[in-house]
Amino acid sequence: MSQAYRIGAGMRVDRASQYGEGGRWPADALTVPVDGLRSLTKLMKVENMTKDRLARETAIEESRKRFGIEVILFERDFGINSYLNRAPELKNPEQLSGARILVNRYHLLDLLPKEGRVVEVGVDRGHFSRRILDSAKPDSLTLIDIDLSRMTDENREFLSRNPSVEIIEGDSAKTLKSLKGKFDWVYIDAHHGYDFVKRDIEAIYKKIKLDGYLIFNDYTMWSPANMMNYGVMRAVNEFLNDNQNWVVTHLALQGAGYHDLAIQRRA
């Protein structure tokens, strides 16, 4: 005999075959084997989760629609780019003629100059800093962040032990201005606001060696994860339009649209 729950008139529990002892259950009763009841309970939980997810997705979509309307009305009243940071198109196609698309930024690291002078602006937890050390093997690596408390203890200890690494806490643009000499490449991943990116570019671009690089993380105008403006694309495109001796060499893709753009200084 298989254990079963009788669901229906009386809602009693019985030990019986699927059809009961001596015949079928009454038409107003439903027999569910124990394993089946567990599956039914699991199915009901999944169904409730699905309903909850659908309700929350609907709420998000409604908020998104309201947000979109508010942005349109805001820029109608205060002008284009008064809220969003639309980037201008690049004026010179020749600046893109040799550009390559890469699968990710780690592939980009493999292609950048080795054993050079390198700066990373915005190190966060320090994971990418270690990748730079491993891939580029720089003679010197300067790490700059306005708040180094976010770096993991393990990464801080590892990086601090390396004699080629200098770690500086402070404002990115002010620190970049204070650096001496020329650099082979600089990776910029600090504050993504338009004015902040412009400040970082102005502070460092003249210190890049001929054929050296500036690399910009999160080359986009909008963060889908944080629902906020990014000014990276606008600041970089404006810089390229104003400085025709800089060219785009690589676009390293990222699955959520937070791509990296590498630009190179030419004669």
Image (tube, helix red, strand yellow):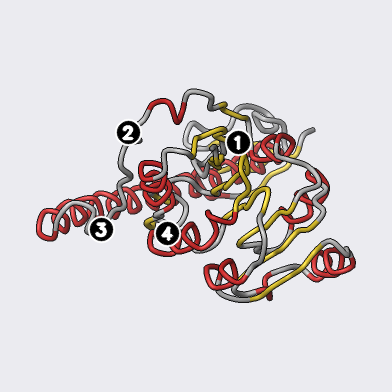
Disc 2: which residue:
91
Secondary structure at badge 2 equals loop
As rendered, which of 27 and 201 lies closer to the eye? Answer: 201
Residue plotted at (84% across, 69% down) = 160
Residue 235: image x %, image y %?
39, 52
Q: How far apart are the alpha carbons under marks 3 and 1?
A: 62 Å
> In the rendered structure, which disc, 3 or 1, sits on the residue that comes first in sequence?
1
Instruction: Count the marks.
Output: 4
> In the rendered structure, which disc, 2 or 4, sits on the residue that comes first in sequence?
2
> In the rendered structure, which disc, 4 or 1, sits on the residue that comes first in sequence?
1
Circle on res. 198? 4
Q: Are marks 3 and 4 in contact (CB under 8 Å)?
A: no
> In the rendered structure, which disc, 3 or 4, sits on the residue that comes first in sequence?
3
Q: Amino acid at mark 2?
A: Lys
Q: Residues within 10 Å of mark 2 (few under 14, many from 20)?
A: few
Q: How far apart are the alpha carbons under marks 2 and 4?
A: 19 Å
Residue plotted at (65% across, 49% down) = 185
Secondary structure at badge 4 equals helix
